[in-house]
Image: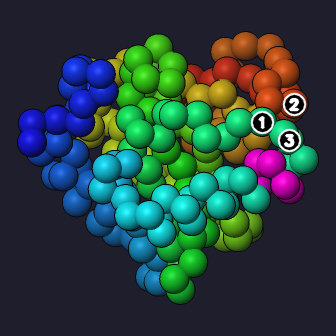
């Protein structure tokens, strides 16, 4: 197959995706396994596990009632970290023109906090985005306001004042890739 399609539009080159995955998956800390899949490549158990964690964290823990299953998973690239068979962090990359006009990373979650898994999954997502979308100027995120400092350490810059989204304060942030 030539590329990942969305409504008859090529989102990215699949051969570039495969070579990029191999490069990004190198040099992982001992005991940590990085998984990278398109929606089409995920099996039911993987998808269910990711959605369960998102619901547990975003809806239950954060007491935020919103529709997490948003039909953008189908065009996203999903990354997650496993340690001893358990998912410890996850996120998704959404190509430009799918969820948002810009290349974006979202649904960033760590299930085990204080071990650097959030920074690791984000750095791997940024690396993959750079390789897979070399023409993109940057990466856009809609960060929870309480996570601003975390994203600033990764190089993101706030591009908006805080605003309410899904019951929580968020702000737009940007990472320049050029």
- Residue at 16 percent across and 52 percent down: it is 19
Q: Is residue 4 above or below residue 59?
A: above
SS at badge 1 = loop
Side (left or right) of 177 relative to 21 = right
Dot 2 or dot 1: first in sequence order is: 1
Q: Is residue 71 above or below residue 81?
A: above
Q: Is residue 156 above or below residue 162?
A: below
Report which residue position mark 1 lands on. Answer: 66
Q: In terms of depth relative to the viewer, which is nearer, 110 or 2?
A: 2
Q: Are marks 3 and 1 in contact (CB under 8 Å)?
A: yes
Q: Position of residue 152 (x, y in %)?
A: 66, 36
Side (left or right) of 50 relative to 8 = right
Side (left or right) of 113 relative to 153 = right
Q: CA distance from mark 3 to mark 1?
A: 6 Å
Q: In terms of depth relative to the viewer, which is nearer, 26 or 163?
A: 163
Q: Quadrant of the C terminus?
A: top left
SS at badge 2 = loop
Report which residue position mark 3 lands on. Answer: 64
Q: Main secondary structure of the magenta part?
A: helix
- Residue at 80 percent across and 14 percent down: it is 161
Asked whether residue 60 is drawn in magenta, I would say: yes
Which span is picked out in magenta? 57-61
Asked whether residue 140 is drawn in magenta, I would say: no
Q: Position of residue 67 (x, y in %)?
A: 71, 36
Q: Quadrant of the N terminus?
A: top left
Report which residue position mark 2 lands on. Answer: 167
Q: Are marks 3 and 2 in contact (CB under 8 Å)?
A: yes
Dot 3 or dot 2: first in sequence order is: 3
Label 2 vs label 1, nearer the camera: 1
Q: Are marks 2 and 1 in contact (CB under 8 Å)?
A: yes
How many numbered circles does the render carry? Answer: 3
């Amino acid at each position: 197959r030539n590329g990942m399609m969305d409504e008859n539009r090529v989102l990215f080159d699949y051969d570039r995706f495969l070579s990029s995955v191999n490069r990004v998956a190198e040099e992982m800390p001992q005991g940590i396994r990085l998984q990278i899949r398109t929606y089409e490549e995920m099996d039911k158990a993987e998808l269910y596990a990711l959605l369960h964690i998102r619901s547990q964290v975003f809806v239950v823990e954060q007491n935020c009632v919103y529709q997490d299953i948003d039909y953008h998973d189908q065009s996203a690239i999903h990354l997650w970290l496993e340690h001893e068979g358990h998912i410890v962090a996850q996120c998704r990359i959404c190509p430009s023109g799918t969820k948002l006009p810009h290349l974006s990373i979202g649904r960033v979650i760590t299930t085990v906090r204080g071990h650097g898994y959030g920074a690791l999954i984000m750095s791997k997502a940024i690396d993959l985005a750079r390789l897979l979308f070399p023409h993109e100027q940057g990466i856009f995120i809609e960060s929870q306001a309480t996570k601003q400092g975390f994203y600033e350490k990764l190089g993101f810059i706030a591009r908006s004042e805080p605003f309410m989204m899904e019951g929580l304060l968020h702000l737009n942030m940007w990472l320049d890739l050029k």
